[in-house]
Image (spheres, grey):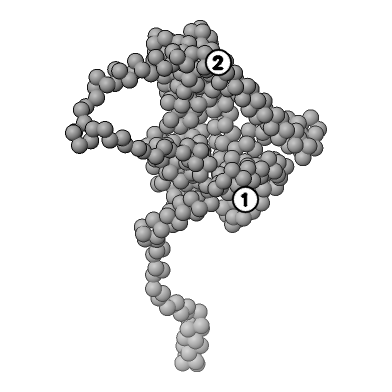
Amino acid sequence: MDYDAEMATGEAQAQTQTIPAPSLPPPNPKLRPHWSMNIIGIAGILTLCYVGESVLVVMLVSVLLAFILAPIVDLLTYLRFPRSLAAAIAILLLLAALAGIVYFSYNQAATLLQDLPKYTSKVRDEALRFRKSAERFEVLAPEHEKGVVSVRPATDWTEVLTRGFGSASAAILAVSFVPFLVFFMLTWQQHVRSATVMLFPLENRHTAYVTLGQISAMVRSFMVGNLLIGLLLGAISTVVFWLIHLPFFYFAGFASGFLSLVPYMGLLLALVPPIFVGLGHTDSQDIVLIIGAVLALHLVALNLLYPRILGKRLQLNPLAVTMSLLVWGALWGAMGLLLAIPITAAIRIIFAHVESLKPYGAWLGE
């Protein structure tokens, strides 16, 4: 009996005893992509941007215009207008405003060209005086180079501005898509946003929703802020040009104010309208006053208005801004300079919400 009891007890203990699981090798660490793969990916994206310039520029410009018109559409929708009708009204208002600006600018330019021959002689005298002053600092050329005229090809600025569109007909065709893209972006705004969020896995949808919201707020504040700063600079410039009796001061003032917003070249472009309309009508003291006023307004906008109005939304350091202007200007020319800052700010927001890209977002940020 004792033997049988011991056997039964041994069998019961063997049944309750757990068999240890076989030891598994430790999981392999997550492989990180090599730095060369990152360079290849960046090069591929830049190549795609360069090749698809016309398409991408049209789409980005349409996005910016849609953000400008969104408050008007929301207001009309609040007033019980159908969203499609509200979007159509907003686009018609935008086209009417652009047509008015073009008509006014054309009339002012035509009047200016009519008045230009009246003071051609004075402009010629000023140019001759400048030439004589320059000849004092002219270095004598070697004997074998005297009498040789160097001819340099002139820069075709229209090619720079329209590079990527091919020809005028292609540019018109590309621009004709903008009103339709803006219309559909405004009418299908909620659907596009929700459908974009649904493209991501379930655990990442909240992050995608927050990221899109921050990009939308950044773009809207960027466009509205630039508009307000341009109007303020234009109004102050108009008053200054009126005080010095500059002809066409209202036209030159607002043109100078908005041209001052162009990144990197804003100061030089802002000087062109007042100096051009002032040829033959202003003396050297007024020219110095114009340059001082434009320079002072540009510095105030750059160091005071931009940080207060746009700094909290953009959060880009000056090095990142300069590099983005260089890269996008080389890729897309003049349109690249205009779109560089919002594109880089959107990239920084995306990097800030992707765990593996957060160091790059911190590098772009302040």
Residue 88 versus residue 188: which sits nearer the camera?
Answer: 88
Q: Which residue is mark 1?
A: 197
- What residue is rendered at 51% in x and 11% in y? 246
Q: Badge 1: few (under 14), some or many (20 or more) residues near its Cα, within 10 Å? A: many
Mark yes or no: residue 229 visible. Answer: no
Q: Is residue 98 left or right of residue 135?
A: right
Residue 38 versus residue 52: which sits nearer the camera?
Answer: 52
Residue flagged by tag 2: what amino acid is it?
Asp
Mark yes or no: residue 162 visible. Answer: yes
Sequence-first disc among 2 and 1:
2
Question: Residue 165: x, y in percent?
Answer: 55, 46
Residue flagged by tag 1: what amino acid is it?
Val
Q: With respect to residue 203, does 189 lie above or below? A: above
Q: Badge 2: few (under 14), some or many (20 or more) residues near its Cα, within 10 Å? A: few
Q: CA distance from mark 2 to mark 1?
A: 58 Å
Give the SS element for disc 1.
helix
- What residue is rendered at 45% in x and 14% in y? 121
Q: Which residue is mark 2?
A: 115
Q: With respect to residue 292, does 211 lie above or below? A: below
Question: Residue 87: x, y in percent?
Answer: 73, 37
Q: With respect to residue 4, does 203 lie above or below? A: above
Q: Is residue 212 left or right of residue 6?
A: right
Question: Residue 204: x, y in percent?
Answer: 56, 52
* Image quarter (top left, top right, bottom left or bottom right) of the C terminus: top left
Question: Residue 188: x, y in percent?
Answer: 71, 45
